[in-house]
Image (cartoon, rainbow, N blue to C red):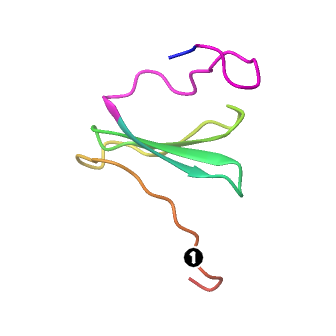
Amino acid sequence: MDPAAENGNEPEILFTHLMEGNGQALDLKGGRTFITDIGGSVYSANLDGWNRRTLLVAEGILTGTAYAEAPAGY
């Protein structure tokens, strides 16, 4: 894998110390990414790496993540 991204920037590690990261979903419209690990934690960050947040911790084994937009009122 070429370490340089198409725009010439080096890749950036957004989250460390995951318990075997195993899922990522992108909200391109909202500019966010969501990451899960097998320890049952869910994290989010802006696509530029800012605003890192832990959303859930040790909720049980997770095997991936998905993102879907729901209509207003849900």
Q: Residue furthest right?
A: 7
Left of 23 or right of it: where is 6?
right
Residue 6 drawn above or below residue 46: above
Question: What crowding class fits label 1: few (fewer than 14 Cα within 10 Å), some (14-19), or many (20 or more)?
Answer: few
Residue 11 belongs to magenta span: yes
Q: Residue furthest bottom?
A: 73
Q: Hey, which quadrant is residue 53 in on the image? A: top right
Identify which residue is drawn at 67% across, 52% down: 28
Residue 44 drawn above or below residue 69: above
Q: Main secondary structure of the magenta part?
A: loop
Residue 4 belongs to magenta span: yes
Residue under label 1, please give it.
Answer: 70
Identify which residue is drawn at 56% across, 21% down: 13
Residue stretch rendered in magenta on the structure: 3-21
Instruction: Choose between 44 and 68: the one closer to the eye.
Output: 68
Instruction: Choose between 30 and 73: the one closer to the eye.
Output: 30
Identify which residue is drawn at 67% across, 15% down: 10
Residue 47 screen position, x and y as percent = 68, 39
Residue 22 screen position, x and y as percent = 34, 38
The amino acid type of the residue labelled 1 equals: Ala
Left of 70 or right of it: where is 29?
right
Circle 1 sits in a helix, a strand or a loop, which is it?
loop
Residue 42 screen position, x and y as percent = 43, 45
Q: Hey, which quadrant is residue 18 in on the image? A: top left
